[in-house]
Amino acid sequence: MSVGRLLLVIVLIAFACPRIVKAQSDASSQASIQQEVLKVEAERDEAMQKADMAVLNRIYADNVVIVNTRGLSLTKAQRLGDFQSGDLKFLSFDQGDYSFHIYGDNVILNGRANSVVQFHGKVNRIPRKFTLTYIKLNGEWRLVAQNETLIDQPQ
Amino acid sequence: MTKLRDAALLAIMALGVICSAFAQDSTKHESDAQTQKEILAVDNERYEAMKNRDMAAMDRLHADGLVFINTKGRMLNKAEYLEEVRSGALKFLSVETDDYKFCIYGDTVIMSVRAKSVVEYHGVVNKKPRRFTSVFIKMQGHWRLVAHQATLIADE
C-alpha cells in the first residue's frame, strides 16, 4: 500500500470513528431513556389499578392536560379524583404496542390499550390508542399530556 | 438606633426579594404570552398549508418523527399524514376552533383545543366536534409539531 493510500485510510478512520461512537452513544442514551420512561409507566399502571394517590400525584405534572376517550378535557385534580372516588376503575389491564419518539428531555409515547375500564358506572371494552407526553422536570419524568381515542371498529 | 437601622435594612432586603419575584413572574408571563402567539401563528400556517395543500410548508411545520392519531384511532407517521393531505383524502371544508389551553415547558408546548371544523376524510364528511392535543417542540429555532391526537367529543 502506498503512503498516499495509507494516509487516506487513516483519515477515513479518523473521520468515521467519532461518528460511530456518537451514534452508539445516542442509541444507548435513547434506550436508557426508554427504560426509564417504561419504568415510570409501569408504576403509573400499578398506581391506577390500586388508586395509589401518592404515586399518581408524583407522576402527573400539576398542569397535565388530559383528554379522555369521550373528548373531555380533565385537570390533574379531576383525574386523580376519579381514581380516588372509584368513578374510574380498571376491570382488567392490558396495554402495550409502545412506540417512542425522544427529543432530549421530552418523550412521546404512543401505545394501544385493550383494558376494560369502568367510568362513572359505564363499562368500556373498546380498544384505544393513546399519546403520552413525558417531560423530565427537576430530574423526574412527569406526565404532562395524555390523549386517548377509541379505535374505530369495522362495522 | 442600631435596631431601627437593622429593621430598615431588613425591610429594604425583603422589598428587593419581592420585587425580584414579581419581575421574574412578569418576565415569565410575557415570555409565555409570546410563545403562545408563536404557536398560534404556526398552527394557523398549518391550517393554511393543509387548505392549500402546500406540501413544502407541511414538510417544514411537521417534525420528521411526527405521530398523528386521528379521530378513528388510526396512527399515521409524517409521510402517511402528508400523503393524506396531498392526495385530498383529508380536506378541511371549514375551520373553527376554540377553548385553547396551553402548557409551556421551555421549548415544549402542549396545546389543547376544541374544534368544530368540518372535515372530509376519504369521502366522508365529519361535522362532529372533537378535542385534540398537539405537542410542539422548538427545533433549530423553529416550532414543529411532533405529536397530535384528536378525539371526538361524545354526546352528553
Image (cartoon, coloured by chain):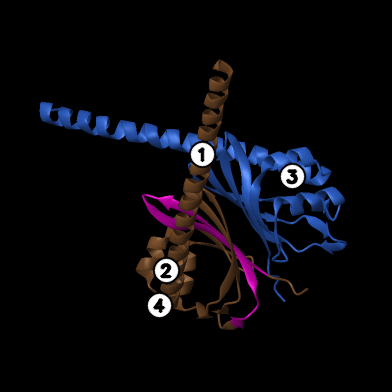
- The amino acid type found where label 1 is placed reads Cys
Look at discs 4 and 3 and give the one toward the viewer: 4
Alpha carbon separation for disc pair 4 and 1: 49 Å
Range covered by the magenta-colored residues? B125-152
Contact flag, marks 4 and 3 (Cβ < 8 Å)? no
Which tag, 4 or 1, sits closer to the chain's start? Answer: 1
Residue beneath the point at 81% across and 57% down = A117
Q: Chain of mark 3?
A: A
Alpha carbon separation for disc pair 4 and 3: 43 Å
Residue named by callout 2: B45
Residue named by callout 1: B19
Say the numbered circle drawn on residue A45: 3
- The amino acid type found where label 2 is placed reads Glu
Tell me residue B111's x, y (percent).
56, 59
- Give the colour in which the image draws chain A: blue
Q: Chain of mark 2?
A: B
Q: Main secondary structure of the magenta part?
A: strand
Residue B106 seen: no
Q: How many marks?
A: 4
Residue named by callout 4: B52
In the structure shown, which secondary structural element does the residue marked by tag 3 occupy? helix
Tell me residue A22's x, y (percent).
38, 34
Residue A6 seen: yes
Which tag, 1 or 2, sits closer to the chain's start? Answer: 1
Q: Is residue A20 magenta?
A: no
Q: Is residue A35 above or below residue A75?
A: above
